[in-house]
Image: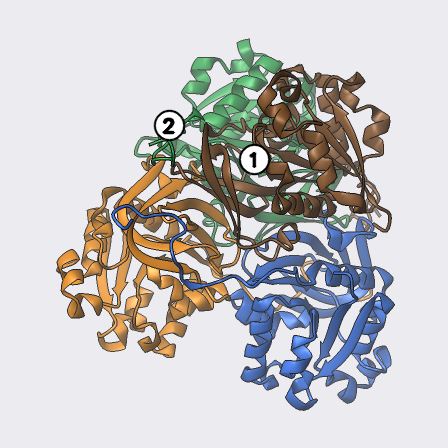
Chain colours: A green, B brown, C orange, D blue
Amino acid sequence: MSRKVRVTVWNEFRHEKESEIVRKAYPDGIHTAIGEGLGSVVDVTYATLDDAEHGLSEEVLNNTDVLIWWGHKAHDEVQDEIVNRVHDRVLKGMGLIVLHSGHFSKVFKKLMGTGCDLKWREADEKERIWVVAPSHPIVEGIGEYIELEAEEMYGEHFDIPQPDELIMVSWFEGGEVFRSGCTFTRGQGKIFYFRPGHETYRTYYNEQIRRVISNAVQWAAPTTREYPKYGNHKPLETIKGKA
Amino acid sequence: MSRKVRVTVWNEFRHEKESEIVRKAYPDGIHTAIGEGLGSVVDVTYATLDDAEHGLSEEVLNNTDVLIWWGHKAHDEVQDEIVNRVHDRVLKGMGLIVLHSGHFSKVFKKLMGTGCDLKWREADEKERIWVVAPSHPIVEGIGEYIELEAEEMYGEHFDIPQPDELIMVSWFEGGEVFRSGCTFTRGQGKIFYFRPGHETYRTYYNEQIRRVISNAVQWAAPTTREYPKYGNHKPLETIKGKA
Amino acid sequence: MSRKVRVTVWNEFRHEKESEIVRKAYPDGIHTAIGEGLGSVVDVTYATLDDAEHGLSEEVLNNTDVLIWWGHKAHDEVQDEIVNRVHDRVLKGMGLIVLHSGHFSKVFKKLMGTGCDLKWREADEKERIWVVAPSHPIVEGIGEYIELEAEEMYGEHFDIPQPDELIMVSWFEGGEVFRSGCTFTRGQGKIFYFRPGHETYRTYYNEQIRRVISNAVQWAAPTTREYPKYGNHKPLETIKGKA
Amino acid sequence: MSRKVRVTVWNEFRHEKESEIVRKAYPDGIHTAIGEGLGSVVDVTYATLDDAEHGLSEEVLNNTDVLIWWGHKAHDEVQDEIVNRVHDRVLKGMGLIVLHSGHFSKVFKKLMGTGCDLKWREADEKERIWVVAPSHPIVEGIGEYIELEAEEMYGEHFDIPQPDELIMVSWFEGGEVFRSGCTFTRGQGKIFYFRPGHETYRTYYNEQIRRVISNAVQWAAPTTREYPKYGNHKPLETIKGKA
């Protein structure tokens, strides 16, 4: 794509309003920290749960190349109509980056077809995210691992389909591992799930985390092709006895 | 599994009642032809759309190791409650074999997360199904290809996620190709999609087609393990500052 | 990568010297037709079998981001030392695009670990290459299929490992199918195998074929990261009883 | 397969002769401990480096369904002729289970096409092997994880191609992770790499480890099919202008 990739960062934006701790970590909301991390090489807009249509009108989505999704405590409040709209846009080619607790969002579960459950623990423990697919563009510029001094733990089994590509695996101080960076394709859309980012930690200010998300945005941007034709199809060759 | 695999063959069973041509091809219903093809090495029961709960009560599903699904013209009549029940059983470990027009069934679309659309044509044309994963147990005993003198055409793009394993690819006389044998895992369940079997052709009496389905039943039978534990998880190791 | 990708096009360049038919199809050699098809967005250099070190000195390879390989009748004449050098450079990150009969080159077989054999036939028959991974950047700008009026046939089973991504599947007039566009990763290097291009047909002048190869060059360009550290590794955490 | 699977356990069998510590762990050799763990449901024979032809004559290999490989300090002493013979048998359908330090064996590297390097450390540390593909037959009967009180550490990046299926991931006390259970196919052969088993620990007496290897033997046993036909192939359909 020669023009800038158009990114919409969606945030539930509730923790920040209700918790002093979260507000201290993300004074302007998690979405803003994510968006600022993308820099000026992309066009960023924001949308949150309490906006009209959750900020995800047809017009907004039709002008979004890549949608980033952060949600946690209010997955159920996302209206099914909007979930279906986002799902449909992904199948039509919009990239989707699902962060952290977004694993339980309606739209991620709908795209995966599985329960998307996992183990979790809030214990201020160390996470070390190891790169296992070193040639993938999503880890361009990233070291052998990203170390986060304190994060929420997510542990296996993570109930997702086998990812197309497994890019990162986390080690947790408390003894678990987790497939932390996974790609999927659904329809014309590319999807990246990235684990870190509990609301009480300033993870989205970490330069390496920001780099991964920026890389993922470029990777997930739509490919320019005509949408496939489905349905009844005339033969391209002569069929015997029909000539 | 040391005991026989318990298979339930589900058929919409409408074409056979409404069309003389289909009834001639499958006098006792498509399900019966499929079930007979499995032989006595498995325990077969049948269920159809017009049975109570579509024949898929909790009890039936809890006693099913592998469910085979054939549906076409009445996908919409399958109640969402039953779809969710089947979906849930697959995630818990039941194998699922989806045949032909079942690609558009509610449960397959829910498991895939995509539209599952494709090109199609009814033109009595030749299909040649080539094996591309020759060491897979699903093609044990199968030759280099299976040739069907007349079948419905299904063509790419087939809107499914990238399969875990691509086992067979079809060539069609009219000029198309199709990924005809695909495996997926969802939760604890194994899924096999197998293309052939339009209702007007006696495809399910073909010995090679029957062998593929029989092999797939053994492949899809559940693995015996405790269901994974999800949710809050105590640390297995001491976390610094928490000791 | 902000600078131009540096591509080396390697051609055996023997058919063109020995056959009037091939010389007519490719007066300046197959490599030139491939290189011209890449346009000016990349830096192209050429290397051929009969050059010193087959044109693939350490210096040339160290300044190559993506190597394109066309070989057929003289695979055995490629010296093992050069094969090992190319293999090593791929593992270190150089992209590799293997075309057509290059399936039987020493370096492709060494990277795959398999025999890489297939069925073939020269019968001036039609090939139709269907896209099965429509969101992949390698098929950006490509239609539903590419049709070639006359090509050599390659048929399954193609003895390669399961590709990371299957992007295109060919239909042949004579009744076969073939996995024609396949990606692999080996070490830090990305590999794309692309089927078409028998020496007697002007396939590498076809605009759609050129577009696929151009896309593949961008896709295969190296990711910028430090090479992974291997070998003995000091613990990052305190090990009990060792503190 | 209705008859018993015929397993050959190959061991370098040098550490046991040279080190008191290893001899104490494996008085009759690592191979014997592995073979006994398979029980009587399979037919087990043994072969070691210092046997004639390393115990891997044509006859032995032709009568082996699944070969298990443990080697470490003498990879270079395995003759290329025998390596090629084993490689060829795998491509023809023999299953191969590569254990622990076998990652650096000539035959595994030849099958993978990569360097197969990794990080390592001998520090008597804890390993916890997590199951990430819970429905796979290789983990039938296995809990959520296998815990080994002391093992050698292997850490990422593990320089292998993307596995067909990733089944287990290890957590190490010192801070690393590792893809510990990986499947691959090459030609007609199925390959399973399984990490644990340093020579100084009694890992191959562990019941869960033995169960994994036993399951892998059943999974890797050859599929009964005719070997694919390669080479020149007559058309199956009439080609225009050739009729």
Q: Is residue D165 left or right of residue C26?
A: right
**Quarter where residue B38 is shown:** top right
- At label 2, counting other C-alpha atoms closer than 10 Å, the crowd grade (few under 14, some 14-19, many 20 or more) is few
Chain ID of residue with mark 1: A
Q: Is residue B147 left or right of residue C180?
A: right
Residue drawn where x is 46% and y is 59% of the image: C188
User: The disc labelled 2 sits on which kind of residue?
Assistant: Lys
The nearer-to-camera label among 2 and 1 is 2
Q: Marks 2 and 1: same chain?
A: yes
Counting residues from the start of the chain, the first of labels 2 and 1 encountered is: 1
Q: What percent of the width, then of the height, locates residue A72?
A: 67, 25
Q: Is residue A162 left or right of residue D206?
A: left
User: The disc labelled 1 sits on which kind of residue?
Assistant: Tyr
**Compared with residue C192, is residue B54 higher up or lower down, i.e. above or below?**
above
**Quarter where residue C85 is shown:** bottom left
Instruction: Report the Cα–Cα distance between label 2 and label 1.
Output: 52 Å
**Quarter where residue B26 is shown:** top right
- At label 1, counting other C-alpha atoms closer than 10 Å, the crowd grade (few under 14, some 14-19, many 20 or more) is many
Q: What percent of the width, then of the height, locates residue A199?
A: 65, 30
Instruction: Name the residue at the top extreme.
Output: A52
Q: Secondary structure at mark 1?
A: helix
Q: What percent of the width, then of the height, locates residue C209?
A: 28, 46
Residue drawn where x is 77% and y is 78% of the image: D45
Q: Is residue B155 left or right of residue B146?
A: left
Q: Which residue is mark 2?
A: A234
Quadrant of the rendering where the C terminus of chain C is positioned: bottom right
Residue drawn where x is 16% and y is 56% of the image: C25
Name the foreground residue: A189 vs B167.
Answer: B167
Kindly tell me whether residue B155 is visible in this rendering: no
**Compared with residue A73, is residue C150 higher up or lower down, i.e. above or below?**
below
Q: Which residue is mark 1?
A: A204
